[in-house]
Image (tube, helix red, strand yellow):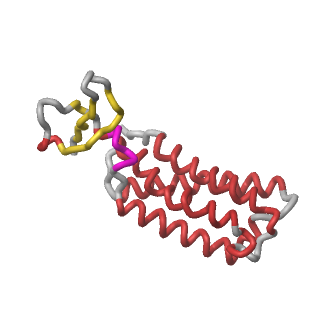
Amino acid sequence: MDFTALVLVSGTGEDLGCRFWKSKAETTPEVLPYNEHELTFMLLDHRLLVAGLVFWGAGTLALRLLGQYLFVPQAGPRLIVVFLAGFLACGWIVRTLCRRFRLSVEQWPAAASAVVLPTLLLDPVSTLWFGSVFPNIEPGMAPVFAAWILACCAGGVIGASVRPRHHA
C-alpha cells in the first residue's frame, strides 16, 4: 500500500513537523509523497506482534523452568554460548516468520520490529522484578539476563536485515 503525508505548515510556509497519513487514494495536490518504508513503525503487522508475544511467553516459561541451567554465575564460556545461541535463534525465528507469512524482503525489517517489540516492552518489567519472575535464577544474574535479551533482539533485527541468498 502506498502512503502519503499531509504536512502541517505555518502561515509562513514553515514545516511544523506534524504529519497526517492518508492512503494514496485520498491524496490531494497539497500532499507530499512518502514511501511506505518510512512508515515502518506505524504499520506493524498484528500477526507478527502476536507471534512475538507467543515467543516471549514461551521463552519466559522456559526460563522459569530451566533458566537456572542457562544463567549460572561465573560461567563465562557457558554465557558466551548462551548469548550466541540466543542471537542466532532469534535471527532464525524472524527470518522463518517472514518466509512463512510470505513477506517481501523489503518488509522484513518492519517484521523484525513487530516480532521483537513484545520482548523489548515486557522484559524490562521481568528484569525489574527478576527474583519474582524467575525465582529459579540467581537474582544477581538480572543484568546478564537484560544483556542477553538485547542480544536476542539484535539477532532478530540483524536476521531480518541480512538479505537472503538467491540460488541460481
Nearest the viewer among 95 and 64 is 64
Nearer-the-camera pick, 33 or 153: 33
Residue 115 placed where, x, y %? 46, 57
Q: Where, by quadrant of the figure, is residue 131 drawn?
A: bottom right
Q: Picture coordinates of residue 21 (x, y %)? A: 25, 43
Name the quarter where the N terminus is drawn.
top left
* x then y, percent, for residue 8: 27, 34
Q: Is residue 48 magenta?
A: no
At 26% from the left and 42% from the top, the residue drawn is: 20
Q: Residue at x 51, y 61 (%)?
A: 118
Could you tell whether 81 is left or right of 101 in the image? right
Residue at left offset 54%, top offset 71%: 57
Front residue of 102/15: it is: 15
Residue 62 lies in quadrant? bottom right
Q: Farthest right residue? A: 74
Q: Quadrant of the C terminus?
A: top left
Residue 107 sits above or below residue 129 on the image: above
From the viewer's perspective, is 40 left or right of 147? left
Which stretch is magenta? Answer: 37-42
Percent coordinates x, y for residue 119 in the rendering? 55, 60
